[in-house]
Amino acid sequence: MKKPTRRKCAWCRGWFHPVREGQIVCTYTCAAEYGRAQTEKAKAKAAQLAKQRQRDQQKEERAAWRERKDKLTTKSEWMKRAQDEFNGYIRERDFDRPCISCGDINPPDLHGGKWDCGHFLSVGSHPELRFEEKNAFRQCKRCNGGAGHYTRKNHTVSQRYRENLVAEFGQDYVEWLEGPHEPKRYRIEDYQRIRDEYKAKRKALIESREEAA
């Protein structure tokens, strides 16, 4: 192969005439600097690969730990995880709504925050509606805790909840909620699916709102 008459030095980028095939630097000084730079580059790459291997190992260890932990998690704990994600989604869905019962938009800041996910028909009396989005709305902690601040008006929190649902969605909507409904028998796999579904839906709502801001 014919040697080039001249080429640029790989280090100083000056033009030079190679005296041997494969020569890429013009002087011994440039060769030393180029070699040092390549060594440092190789060390940096090796360090980066080592860090990546460490991160991968830590990720595998965390995944294995979660898998072991999940195997020890009871069905009731999985139900709580699913419920927490569902409730978080409802609060995010209704972030700009007033309380479904009292209509407050800035209720008292009670312990744990201002807002809950309030079920119209409670999960205790109607477990089949536990994850029914039409049965849950953002509710202030005062109302969700059963506060009696409607007694002077001969109302209860649940009565106001129902009246507001009828006013907004209609009588048929509320009558459908009030049943009857088929009972549901959730498995651990169902709770895991529900948890993941509402975690993703809540995240999508947050991202959409941030993009629109």
Image (cartoon, rainbow, N blue to C red):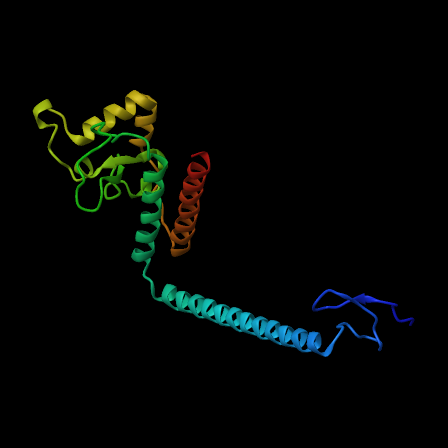
User: At 29% from the left edge and 56% from the top edge, which residue is drawn?
Assistant: 76
How many numbered badges does the structure rendering display?
0
x, y percentage for residue 86?
35, 44
Q: Seen from this angle, which residue lies furthest left?
A: 152
Side of 44 where 190 appears, left or right: left
Quadrant for the N terminus, please: bottom right
x, y percentage for residue 85?
35, 47
x, y percentage for residue 206?
41, 41
Side of 147 where 98 appears, left or right: right
x, y percentage for residue 185?
36, 49
Measured along the vertical axis of the image, is residue 138 above or below residue 69? above
User: At 61% from the left edge and 71% from the top edge, which residue is drawn?
Assistant: 41
Q: Examine the image and state in which quarter residue 130 appears.
A: top left
Side of 19 where 154 appears, left or right: left
| 105 vs 52, nearest the viewer | 52
Side of 16 where 176 appears, left or right: left
Q: Examine the image and state in which quarter residue 182 appears.
A: top left
| 45 vs 209, nearest the viewer | 45
User: At 44% from the left edge and 70% from the top edge, which residue is drawn?
Assistant: 61
Quadrant for the C terminus, please: top left
| 50 vs 28, nearest the viewer | 28
Q: Examine the image and state in which quarter residue 146 appears.
A: top left
